[in-house]
Image (cartoon, grey):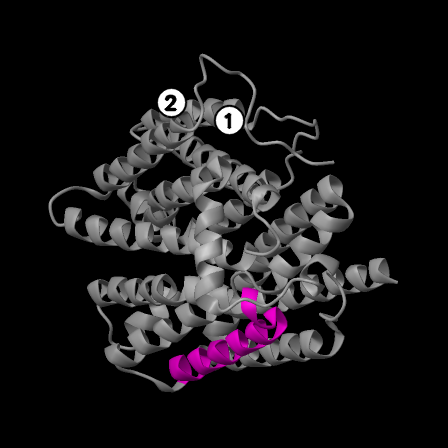
Amino acid sequence: MIKNKLRQNVHVYYVATLLLIISGALPHAVLTIILLNKGLTLSQIMLVQAGFSLAIMLSEYPSGLLADTFSRKKIFLISKLFMIAMFLMVIYGNSFSGMVLAWFLYGIANALDSGTIDADLINHLKEGHAELGLSKFIKNNNRLSFLALLIGSTIGSLLYYQVGIKFYFLSILLTLTAIGLVAILYDEKNMNKAEKHMPAKPILAQGKAGILELRHSKALKMMMGLSFVGQFFFQTHYQLWQALYLYHGINQRNFYLFYLTFQIISILAYSMPTPKSGVVHYQRVLCLLLFVFAGLIFGLYSKMNVLFIASYILLVFLFTIFDYISSYIFAKNVSAAHISALTSLKSTCGRIAALISLGLSSFLLNFFSVQTVATLNFVFATIFSIAVVLNFYTIFKNRKLVFKIKA
């Protein structure tokens, strides 16, 4: 009975995730155009994105504590109401302050969503099917996310030139459909026996307990550190890849092909197999990948566009694999009691890094080329990721990893 409910919940989550990511991805390929048409400058657009990251940074950990203390399903549904409010503000707002507020609401929506029913399902899969169930769920979830991004951005780019900003009404419709599916079909009751018999804790006590778990877990601290430094790569990629391609003289009419390529290689990255042995040498794999990154960065300076594009795409591919392994390790080592709070805290660390990266990049672009700024971010992410891994693992003294995968 519980297995059937778990299977139903997973399927409902997949469908809802597909609808929600498509709704959010509709403007991805034309977002800069939308904001420019609303009278914003490029500098103001960067501040709008910073407002998004700031909202997540301020609200994600508190929202994770709420999800661990109260109903994760209800927190998830509330987050989607914030999304709808954001869509309406984008449709009807035309000022810089209005867009900052819209993206601030967007950030709160993302913060509330983090560590809700996804964390609920991870707990159930860890309890029931451990290795295979959790690994399959993480892979499917990320592949589905990238597929939805591909579908949403493609549909959005086509619709925008037909109906303009009104395509956000489709985003609202898809979000309302997802809300209905989860509200009606997602069964939160009597699923996790461990959580069912766990006495409720006050929010502050829950937070202290989560921090205590983090302090005593090398695996979790390592993932927090990697989440922080990894944002220097991903934020640079998200915000500057188009400018970097233009710097190399690549035709902007082909940008949609590169966007689709990024989604496809991300799907491939999250399809890579995870080791299934009892004690897994994850850290050696992470170190190997990071040292490969260092070599690829030199390819970004090639005057041959083919070599530049190949190096860049491979960098994105390998960093995405790295991110997948990191997410897997975190999910396997975090406890059911504090999964929402610590997942949110991990994301908050990433958002702090995102704000720092965006701010520094915005400043440095006044003095250096986009090539130099992007390279500095990539080098920083690579070097400090290596430092984080080596800090928790004496690679020359002990070849066995501290992360044990429970069967």
Residue 110 visible, this angle:
no
Could you tell me the amino acid type at mark 2? Answer: Gly
Q: Is residue 177 left or right of residue 347?
A: right
- Tell me the crowding category of disc 1: few under 14, some 14 to 19, or many 20 or more residues within 10 angstroms, Cα based: many
Q: Residue at x 81, y 64 (%)?
A: 5
Q: Is residue 189 left or right of residue 264?
A: right
Along the line of sight, which residue is nearer the eye, 230 or 145?
230
Q: Main secondary structure of the magenta part?
A: helix
| Residue 72 sits inside the magenta stretch | yes
Residue 299 sits above or below residue 8 on the image: above
Q: Nearer the viewer, mark 1 or mark 2?
A: 1
Q: Earlier in the sequence, mark 1 or mark 2?
A: 1
Residue 283 tag number: 1
Q: Residue at x 53, y 50 (%)?
A: 260
Along the line of sight, which residue is nearer the eye, 58 or 256?
58
Q: Circle 1 sits in a helix, a strand or a loop, which is it?
A: helix
Along the line of sight, which residue is nearer the eye, 12 or 224?
224
Kindly report the distance in space between the C-alpha atoms of the residues bearing marks 1 and 2: 19 Å
Q: Is residue 360 left or right of residue 50?
A: left
| Residue 240 sits inside the magenta stretch | no
State which quarter of the image contains the C terminus.
top right
Mark 2 lies on residue: 295
Q: Residue 206 location, x and y as percent?
A: 49, 61
Could you tell me the amino acid type at mark 1? Answer: Gln
Residue 111 sits above or below residue 266 on the image: below
State which quarter of the image contains the N terminus.
bottom right
The part of the chain drawn in magenta is 68-91
Q: Circle 2 sits in a helix, a strand or a loop, which is it?
A: helix
